[in-house]
Structures are given as C-alpha cells and as structure tokens.
Amino acid sequence: MGGVVTASVRAAYAGFAAFGALWGVWGALLPSVREQAGLSHGQLGTALLFIGAGALPAMLLTGPAVDRWEHRVTALLQVALGGTGVVVAVTGHGFVSLCVGLGLLGAVSGAADVANNAAAASAEQASGHPVIARAHGVFSASVVVTSLIGGALRGVDAAVAVPFLLATAAGGAAGLITLAATRTFAAAGVRGLQPAPRPRTRRRPLSTLRLLPLLVAGGLVALAFAVENAHQSWSAVYLGDVLSAGPAVAAAGPAVFAGVVALARFAVATLTHRHALAVLIAGALTAALGTAVVAAAANVAIALTGLGLAAAGTAVLQPTVLGLVARRVDETARGRATAVVTTVAYLGFLAGPVYVGQWAGAVGLPGAMLAVAAVAVVLALLTWPAVRLITRTPAAEVEPVGRR
C-alpha cells in the first residue's frame, strides 16, 4: 500500500508543477499580451475579468465529475492546461479576442484547480503529511522557473506563443503521471488518490454538504487570492511602468514573488497543521506590510524587497485554509467540497487583478498597491472568527449504507 500512497503524492505534485508552469509563463508574458492586444491598464483589468467568468461555472461542474470519475478527469485537465495558453497567445490580438481566449483559459485552469486540490487533499489524508502546502510550494517553484524562462524569451523578442509551449509540455507530462497513478490505484483495488480502506457509502448530493464552513473557508482564501494574484499578475507591469525596469528585470517581479512563496510554503508546511490561526494572522499582516513597501518603493530593489515580504505572507494563507477543510471532509464528497471552497476563492483570484486595474486607472499603480494592502489587513481581522467557525463545524457528512 505504501507504493500507492507514494503514487498519489507524486501525482499531486506533478499536477501543481504543470499548473505553475502555465501561470509562471502568464505572469512573465502579461506585458507582451497587453502590448499585442493594444490595451490600456483599465482595459486589461476588464479583460482579466473573463478568466474568473470562465472559471466559476467550470469549477462547480468539476467537483461532481471528480467524485464520479475520480482523477481520470484530473489527468485530462492537466493535459489541456498549456494548450489553452497557446490559444490565448495566438488569438489575443484585440480586446474582444483576448477576452474570449481568457474565458477559455479560465474555464480550463479553474477546473484543473479544483481537480488538483482534490488530489492533493486526498494524498494528504492518505499519507499523513502536509501534501497540500508542499504541492502549493511545487506550484510556486514551477512559477519561478517558467517566469524566468518566459522573461528571457520576451527579452529576445520571441513570439508570445513560444513560452506557452513549455507549459503545454509540462501539462502533458503531469497528465501521463496522474493517469499512470490512477491505473496503479485501480490495480490495487482502491479509490481515486485515497488508498485508505473505507466502508461502502451512499453518495449524497451537494445540498447535503455543510455549506457554511465551506463558504467561510472559501471567503478567506478569496481575500488571500486577491492579494496574491494582484502581485502575481501586476508585478511585472508595475516594475516596468512605475520604476522603468527593462523586460528581463520586470519579469523578475513574478519570479521573486513566486520564489519566496515556494520557500515559505516548504519551510512552514508543518506549522500549517499545528498553528493554523497564528500562521494565518501573521501571514496576512506580513502581506499588508510588504505591499505597502511596494507602493512606497523608489527603486526596483526596494520594490522587490516588498514583493518578497508580501510573498512570504500570502504563501501560507491558501494551503492553511485548505488543510483545515481537508481534515473535515469525507473522501466521497472530496470533489464537491473542494469545488465549493475553490469556486468562492476564485472570486478573489478574479477580483485581485481587476481591483488593481480599476484603482490604477483612478489613482495610479502605487495607490492601487495601498488598496491591496488594505485587503490584507481586512483578512487579518476576519481570520479568528472564520477559523473558529471552520474548526467547530464538520464540512460534510456521508451516511454509511445500512445506517440511518
């Protein structure tokens, strides 16, 4: 059975590596995408809205699909990830075409987000190790590598589609690893990515989940996502437009952010289990401080320092909340519960870049960063009552067959 557990963990890490490859390339190439489409800051902020618009319905559909067809769905979505980036790069030559492409990108990436997080939660429950935090660390490390590669290719004027081909290759490899793992599980007579033996259960519909703790958890992650994705999506633009950094240096913004996130997630993975409340509050306050430093920065070095602080703070937020939920969900409801949390959380992923774009149009990018810092402060204030509710209420119950 140990080999099955190892396969589940390996598949979870591979999925997040592919996910990070896509978004690392995206962060580095966002200035090029904007230039190719000929958009202003405000128009870009509006176009980014379509990522969330595509993601939200796809995420809600993915949870039940994972519960029914297990992680064969996950493998398919991993293969599709990089190809959607290529579609955006090839077709995004105007506002309308970019919005359509971003809607497709959002649908595929949102579905993959649900599937990958469900896989990581299953592997964490099976192994007893903090797989979620480490998988998110793998995601961030992948973002670092692909951001740097994307920035280098942008610096030599490579076509926008070329870096996305790297994400396509990463997604294909992850899909093959996950598919091979599902076959290993089937041969061992186990379900999904969770090899622990369980009694037969009767499936119950989404309405039987305890939605309140899931919605609250999703709300916390949404605020964390708003801060994290504000920096990940806009840091290259900020360094270039506000501090006059060149293309390669500007690409260092998302790379530095993701690099610190990766290190922080690996470093504090065990603390997310033992001291969740303290980790969340400290993380939110650190993110607020770092974002304020970015807003006040007079040069690239200070801005990168602020980005590092913001990254260290946001790094621990999402994995900690997801870990709290994972320990309170039965395996047969894993996909649906994950879909609820991540769908609500994606509202923050959607709102963060748009929030920056709208504030930037009104008061400039430095003022927009102060508005992001305010979001992190609000998150710190809401953490204690939210965690109390999540930890006192089971997220889902599944009734064993033959019992009432």
Image: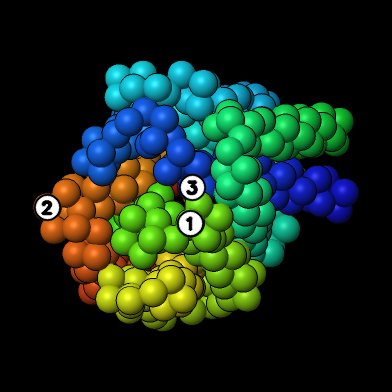
Evaluate whether residue 269 shows in this view. no
Mark 2 packing: few (<14 Cα in 10 Å), some, or many (20+)?
few
Task: Kindly give the residue lying farthest to the left in the view shown.
Answer: 362
Is residue 90 depicted above or below 198 in this figure? above
Q: Which residue is labeled 1 in the image?
A: 246
Q: Which label sits in the foreground, 2 or 1?
A: 1
Question: Residues at badges 2 and 1 in contact (C-beta under 8 Å)?
Answer: no
Mark 3 packing: few (<14 Cα in 10 Å), some, or many (20+)?
many
Mark 1 packing: few (<14 Cα in 10 Å), some, or many (20+)?
few
Q: Amino acid at mark 2?
A: Ala
Q: Amino acid at mark 1?
A: Gly
Q: Which mark is residue 362?
A: 2
Q: What is the total number of numbered labels drawn onto the structure image?
A: 3
Residue closest to the eye, 266 or 85: 85
Q: Which mark is residue 27?
A: 3
Quarter of the picture containing the C terminus is top left
The residue under the point 36% across, 18% down is 97
Q: Helix or strand or loop: what does disc 2 sit on?
A: helix
Q: CA distance from mark 1 to mark 3?
A: 15 Å
Is residue 28 depicted above or below 110 in this figure? below
Spot occupied by residue 231 in the image (x, y as percentages of width and height): 39, 58
Q: Which mark is residue 5?
A: none
Q: Which one is earlier in the sequence, the residue at label 1 or at label 3? A: 3
